[in-house]
Image (cartoon, rainbow, N blue to C red):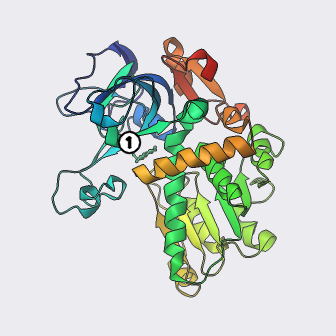
Amino acid sequence: MKAITVKPGIADYLALREVPEPAVGPGEVVVRVARVGVCGTDQEIIRGRYGTAPAGSDFLVIGHEGLGQVVDSGPAATGLSLGDYVVASVRRPCPHAHCRPCRSGQNDMCLTGDFTERGIQGRHGFLSEYYAEHPRFLTPVPPALAPAGALLEPLAVVEKALRQSLKIQERLPWNLERAVVLGAGAIGLLAALLLRLRGIETWVFDRSAPAGRKARLAGQTGAHFANTGETPVSRIAAELGQVDLIVEATGYAPLVFDACQQLGGNGVLCLLGVADEGSPLTIDAGGFNNRLVLGNRLVFGSVNANPADFRAGVESLAQIEQRWPGLTESLQTRRVPLAEFQDAFAGQAEDIEDIKVTVELAGLTPDED
Ligand code: BGC
């Protein structure tokens, strides 16, 4: 079968190749891949900065935002039927007995770092015609939501981030009234969507044009959009007042320190971006310390998502479809056929404002797309 592969550690090696059909383990089902979303992590892997091949392989099948259909449902006990749409989670547990998160199904919180991730760390991903997977790592997607299914993995990442933020804030009497999202890529816009579903005043700060696609999509949900050329991050508190939650979704690490200065008292700053390493920055360490201590502020990072977040994501997709019909379609800015896969990964001029590009494999059955 065809698969899109990289050689981790080697920059710009990206090749469509024939690979063996997946070996189906006990209790696993076979999924035919319909489409796969491309994200910043894939770009990092292609640049050779991230990712590892499975043991014994000199290549890695990339892609971790895969929507597919069950074509071999394995034993009856799986609860899945032929034709069901499913999205697989990404992280698989580490083998260590003392890792309580992994032993309790919360691989997203793995303590040892010895986890694997499909399409990223030590396991092939979903940019192949088929893959095999255990049903416990698959979330069914109702057919009506299948056109939005490629958004489920990044949405689950954001579901987790918000769930964790709200849980953390149980430390005090707290109302989440005003939130700021830094970055209007897929993660940033999905964060804004979830905040708006909860009726929270939401501001999206991004460098894209105030009349551009991203600003327009944010606006459709009732979020406010601010162009950072006009209103820099350093003006947030002065312009908006108390900000209870900031979600950092640009992956531009210096913004973490700027955002901290703008966060309101008792507020929480949630970091979702993976940044380039090796760029030292001079900061006022005492000022940073005091900002946190003297205002009970909290900065935390969040990665990946667990099965509950995927299920929450399906619920949210249903609500989003109902409230803003067509919006999830607009977030998927380009569908690229497999044969033209290079286009899906090519860097885009900023004015194109791509949000989520997908590579089409089997595609969706016609009446669902
Ligand atoms: C994926 C996560 C993954 C993370 C780090 C992200 O792009 O969405 O599932 O844990 O990369 O590898």
Above or below residue 158? Residue 353 is: above
Question: Along the horizontal axis of the image, is 63 left or right of 243?
Answer: left
Query: In the depicted view, which residue is nearer to us: 93 or 15?
Result: 93
Secondary element at image label 1: loop
Query: In the depicted view, which residue is nearer to us: 279 or 90?
Result: 90
Q: Residue at x 38, y 35 (%)?
A: 48
> Residue 3: image x %, image y %?
37, 19
Residue to which mark 1 is pinned: 90
> Residue 2: image x %, image y %?
37, 14
Amino acid type, label 1: Val
> Residue 141: image x %, image y %?
51, 36
Check mark 1 vs ligand 1: CB closer than 8 Å? yes or no. Answer: yes
Question: Along the horizontal axis of the image, is 36 left or right of 125?
Answer: right
Q: Residues within 10 Å of mark 1 (few under 14, many from 20)?
A: many
Rendered-image quarter of ligand 1? top left
The N terminus, quarter of image: top left
> Residue 327: image x %, image y %?
72, 38
> On the image, which quarter does residue 238 sit in?
bottom right
